[in-house]
Image: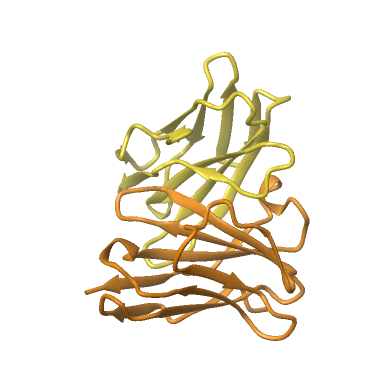
Amino acid sequence: NAGVMQNPRHLVRRRGQEARLRCSPVKGHSHVYWYRQLPEEGLKFMVYLQKENIIDESGMPKERFSAEFPKEGPSILRIQQVVRGDSAAYFCASSPLLQGANTGELFFGEGSRLTVL
Amino acid sequence: DQQVKQNSPSLSVQEGRISILNCDYTNSMFDYFLWYKKYPAEGPTFLISISSIKDKNEDGRFTVFLNKSAKHLSLHIVPSQPGDSAVYFCAASFSGANNLFFGTGTRLTVIP
């Protein structure tokens, strides 16, 4: 009964490189959310996806960031040309329900910590 | 624009005493509130929630109180145990929203 699996747990990149963060939701969950936690801040919503569809990307920076949740395989958060300000913990969460965010039925992974040198 | 605020970054409490964690919000559209608990190097885990139609919800040692007029909620843990030591995040949502709005967290330390 695996929970949300995120990898890598830690990722170090130099400025200008690309970062790819992967998230496998709880088996059977079709709703995936990405949150970012900057140092000394709370978690901030980035994007909500269902299989093959981006439902809400209102929290995602317009440039350099993209997310996908393909029919097969994990969800991927991609950050191109990383800058120091991208250093943060990126958490993925999954839900079995529409509006899982409203019911507490959000199951979080352990996070991927990105450090940009 | 921090719509959910936790003004106390840390709290220390003796084992067996009550822990009270506070949270304020600014958006009057919020109608559902949650508390998450987070241990180091782990993801947040859901603890307890309350709908805006209620003013109290209790689950074992954990009780959440909601004061809509003051836009304030609190989490009471009694009796506190050393295993409760963690960061507690307050979160809020509203009908139709796809996401949660989180506070910055309060680090609770329960001293044995």
Side of B56 relative to A8 (left or right)? right
Q: Residue at x 69, y 45 (%)?
A: A102
Side of B77 relative to A83 (left or right)? right
Whole-percent x, y for residue A80 in the image: 41, 75
Seen from the viewer's position, the closer of residues B26 and B80 is B26
Which residue of the protein is positioned furthest toward the front in this rendering? A63
Whole-percent x, y for residue A96 in the image: 76, 63
Whole-percent x, y for residue A6 in the image: 51, 77
Which residue of the protein is positioned furthest toward the top in this rendering? B69
Above-or-below relation of B84 to B6: below
Tell me where residue B68 sits by quadrant: top right
Q: Residue at x 71, y 53 (%)?
A: A100
Seen from the viewer's position, the closer of residues B69 and A90 is A90
Q: Residue at x 36, y 48 (%)?
A: A41
Above-or-below relation of B104 to A78: above
Side of B13 relative to B99 (left or right)? left
Which residue of the protein is positioned furthest toward the left in this rendering? A117
Whole-percent x, y for residue A20 in the image: 46, 80
Above-or-below relation of A7 to B25: below
Image quarter where the N terminus of chain B lies is top left
Q: Colour of chain B?
A: yellow
Q: Colour of chain A?
A: orange
